[in-house]
Amino acid sequence: MLRDLFTEFSLSPACATFALKEMRDILVDGEGAFLLQGVTGDRLPAKGAEEFDFQVGESATQHQRHLLIAHKGAYKAAPEIGVGIADELNGENPKALLIKAERNFEYDGMRVVTLAYGADGKIYVDATYE
């Protein structure tokens, strides 16, 4: 079952010479509610739908978001994971947030290419699972 969470694909030789893994998982919306197949936008079964199931899809961005939001100790299986972005945004050293995020992404198995603040104040992430 765990093998099904990873789907291997290769980049073209012009882009890179290594294979990346697409992380697949159960998807959630911005509020943390499960996304379901066969369900309308109001989270009720679609008219005529007799069966519905969890939506599964590419989830690297979702995992990055969760790692940034989570505080250390939030995940009992890996208590050292978590950036706690809400606390870090008020900190005096904005670079510390990027360092924590990069370490957490790498610990989770991602290869971080870019992690930086943009001119618009947003955090831009380019990280994929190896």
Image: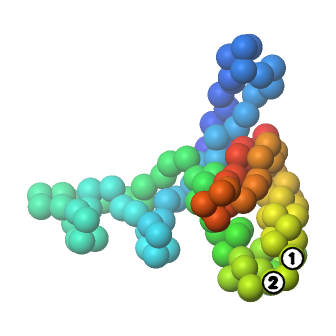
Residue drawn at (72%, 59%), measured in percent from left and top? 117
Q: How many labels does the image show?
A: 2
* Residue neighbourhood size for the residue with mark 1, other residues' Cα within 10 Å, grouped as few (<14), some (14–19), many (≥20): few
Farthest top residue in view: 13
Q: Looking at the image, what colour scheme do you see? A: rainbow
Name the image quarter holding residue 50: bottom left
Residue drawn at (64%, 40%), measured in percent from left and top? 22
Q: What residue type is labelled 2?
A: Gly
Mark 1 vs 2: CB contact within 8 A: yes
Name the image quarter holding residue 52: bottom left
Residue 93 disc label: 1
Q: Nearer the viewer, residue 69 or 107?
A: 69
* Residue neighbourhood size for the residue with mark 2, other residues' Cα within 10 Å, grouped as few (<14), some (14–19), many (≥20): few
Residue 46 disc label: none
Farthest front residue in view: 119
Q: Which amino acid does label 1 sit on?
A: Asn
Horizontal and vertical percent position of residue 90: 74, 85
Horizontal and vertical percent position of residue 118: 67, 56
Name the image quarter holding residue 119: bottom right
Q: How far apart are marks 1 and 2 (CA)?
A: 6 Å
Answer above or below: position of 24 versus 105: above
Q: Can residue 2 be seen in this view?
A: no
Answer above or below: position of 72 versus 112: below
Horizontal and vertical percent position of residue 19: 75, 28
Relative to 47, is 114 on the left or the right? Answer: right
Q: For mark 2, what is the residue? A: 91
Q: Nearer the viewer, residue 15 or 53?
A: 15
Q: Is mark 1 on a helix, strand or loop?
A: loop
Q: Which of 3 and 37 is in front in this view?
A: 37
Q: Can residue 126 be seen in this view?
A: yes
